[in-house]
Image (tube, rainbow, N blue to C red):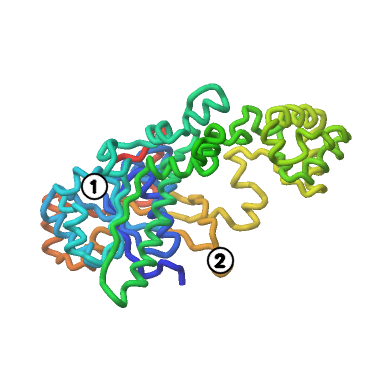
Amino acid sequence: MLPLAGIRVVDLSTVVMGPYASQWLADLGAEVIKIETPDGDSTRHTGPAAEDGMAAIFLGVNRGKRSVVLDLKQPAAQAAMERLLATADVLMHSMRPQKLAALGLAPADVMARHPALVYTSLLGFGEDGPYGGKPAYDDIIQGLAGNAALMAEQTGDARYFPTIAADKTCGLIAALSICAALAGRGQRRQREQRGTLVEVPMFESMAAFNLVEHLYGLHFDPPRGPAGYPRVLAPLRRPYRTADGHVCMMPYTDGHWRDFFTAAQRPDLAADPRFAGIAARTTHIEALYDITGEIVLQQTTAHWLGVCEALQIPVAKVNTLSELPDDPHLRATGFFASLHDPAMGTLRFPGAPVRFDGARTPIGMPPRLGEHTAAVLTSAGVTAAELDAMLTSGATRCMAIQPAGDAAANPGNEIPHQETR
């Protein structure tokens, strides 16, 4: 049995941060009910697709969930939501705080009605600061939290990380925080039926992530140096160019560097006081990277892979993204999983990297819009007549069945760089 088996999560979040968090909860065994507007999550149309509404970015963060359509601006949908919450352990949303009351979802009101609920707000900023309530996007958070400045330190040009770094990092923090709240609730259950209000602000979460190593000299008062870990910020910190390509090579300990310089027939460098210890190497990191780069350029990638493996120095080739599905380690460990869908054909997914009792968690198909509306609402107590009335008014929507063979290619739009709130 998976750790979160028996936990029901009602997820109102969209785009990447929240869906990535709830996908982790689904991978860990929770039943995740994705609540969508009648138009659906915008990522359903972002990227290539074999079927309208099932585009690549949606597939990447919504596997193993159930989709229920509710137009929460309508009273009937709010009433259905109440019935769902009465069956839930967790509520997640990524809406700005000022929008919640009109939908009947203000935190204090919901927790008064459902006191055992783990109510999770995925926010751009903590509400008690001057940015509280402002909209937040991945690009905005990367700028505020220092990502763009880190790139400028290394490359001379302020730019964002070429991945949705803030959304995914904060999604992981959200999943961790929800699991912690569930564990705490379980410990308290014998004494009191009380849930937890969990707030996950993106700005503070990403700042904490970046400052693990980069607070550096500012840990001290007065400062003992500037912010920023020099080894990581060094412009020459990148894969080393070889005679025929590139290699990722990481001598780190004193012994690694002595062995590397000896193998490179540079005993003078092995004895150089600038490189004798980690403190000295950090001070002279640019010189170290420059000299090492000159040495590595003289031999092939295969040569350095062999040398470093023999010396037990961490080393690897450079993989392109398109090469990852054929990486021999990922193949051997069963990292990628394939699922067959009658309409879309075979789909490939990266699996959950963690294992429980030696086994990866199974993955399920991402849901079509409204695929589980009828089943979930009926199980929550919505009658057939009520469901029919909601369908007529547009308060809900059930999946329109698409026959196999009708799937059409949809090139989609550009990959989103934000979490919509």
Secondary structure under the numbered disc 1 in the rendered image = loop
Residue 371 in sight in this render: no
* Residue found 35% across the figure and 54% down from its top: 367
Q: Position of residue 344 (x, y in %)?
A: 43, 49
* Residue found 65% across the figure and 32% down from its top: 238
Circle 1 residues within 10 Å: few <14, some 14–19, many ≥20: some
- Position of the C terminus by quadrant: top left
Q: 191 or 418: nearer the eye?
A: 191
Amino acid type shown at disc 1: Thr
Residue 359 numbered mark, or none: 2
Q: Say left or right for 335 vs 397.
A: right
Give the Cα separation between the discs numbered 2 and 1: 36 Å
Q: Say left or right for 270 vs 61.
A: right
Residue 169 in sight in this render: yes
Amino acid type shown at disc 2: Ala
Q: Which residue is mark 1?
A: 37
Q: Quadrant of residue 116?
A: bottom left
| Image position of 44 with respect to 287: above or below | below
Q: Say left or right for 11 vs 221.
A: left
Q: Position of residue 358 (x, y in %)?
A: 58, 67
Q: Earlier in the sequence, mark 2 or mark 1?
A: 1
Q: 208 or 39: nearer the eye?
A: 208
* Residue found 45% across the figure and 44% down from its top: 208
